[in-house]
Structures are given as C-alpha cells and as structure tokens.
Amino acid sequence: MAKREKNLERFIEIFAFTEDTSKQGRVLESVKVGDVYMSRLRIAPGVTTGNYYYSDTNVLMSVECGAVMMYCENVETKERIEMKVKPGEKLIEIGPKVARATKNIGKKDAILIFFSDKPLRSSTSFSYVVI
C-alpha cells in the first residue's frame, strides 16, 4: 500500500499516504507501517461518513480536529451508543461486528485518526445503516 522513501541518512524511513477521494465530502488517506494501518479521515462540515462494519478488523479512532457525533451499533445484539467526540478527548476501540457512522457537527473540517490491523477499505467491510 505505502511507498517507502529511503533517506540518504539511512536511519529513517518515510511512508507516503495513499489518498482516496471517491466519496463526496471526505478524504481518506492511509498508509501501512509494519502490521499496522494508519488512516486520516477529513470530513467536511455536515457530512456523515461510515455506515458500515467489519467482520474481523479491529480499529482505534481518535478525533484530531473538529467535533463529531459518533454512532455505533452492535450488528448482532442491536445495542447502540451515541457520543460527541472532541479533539484529544478519547481514544475509542471499535471491534469487529460494530457498525459505525460519524458526522461532522462543526463549522470546519473534522479530522479523525484511525489505527487498524487491516485496511479500512477492504473486502471485510459491509454496508450497514447506523444513521
């Protein structure tokens, strides 16, 4: 997924993000470093992203900039959680079979950071309407 840049000093590596602009109102940038995927999601004001779940992917999420409403639903039990998340406030673990959607409720772009054990866009993600 990521292109590695060899530094002339040979003691650091630089990993380039791959950009996905396939959905209006959001930009997803991802990179794989070792066995971990890091993604940065920029969401325009008023835009909702997500509405899907993973069958076997573990995700950590944090808000870097802006304010979002996060909606989660366990696809098996139908238990739901809604929460407002602000920058630096929480690190949220989202396990397999938990559907999620995030909505930017601010007036400026929101930026979310994700760490996962598989790519965020993969064959193990499935559409699921949360909101």
Image: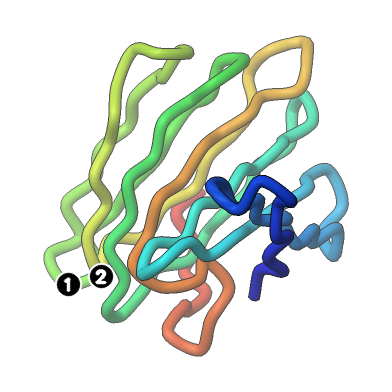
Q: Earlier in the sequence, mark 2 or mark 1?
A: 1
Is disc 2 in contact with disc 1, using a CB cutoff of under 8 Å? yes
What residue is at 66 percent from the left and 24 percent from the top? 110
State left or right for residue 91 relative to residue 79.
Answer: right
Relative to 65, is 69 above or below? below
- 130 over 122 or under it: above or below: above
Kind of residue at disc 2: Lys
Which residue matches tag 2?
97
User: What number of labels is visible?
Assistant: 2
Q: Which residue is mark 1?
A: 76
Q: Is residue 16 left or right of residue 58?
A: right
Horizontal arrangement in the rendering, residue 77 relative to residue 12 (left or right): left
Residue 6, given in percent of the width and then of the height, sits at 70, 60
Give the class, few, some or many, for how many residues have Cα within 10 Å of label 2's Cα (few <14, many ≥20). many
Indicate the secondary structure of the residue bearing disc 2.
loop
Q: Residue at x 65, y 43 (%)?
A: 41
* Disc number for residue 58: none
In-image side of 27 versus 68 (left or right): right
**Residue at the (41%, 31%) spot, across then down:** 62
Q: Amino acid at mark 1?
A: Glu
Q: Nearer the viewer, residue 92 or 5?
A: 5
3D distance between C-alphas at marks 2 and 1: 7 Å
Q: Quadrant of the N terminus?
A: bottom right
Judged by depth in the image, the label closer to the viewer, 2 or 1, is: 2
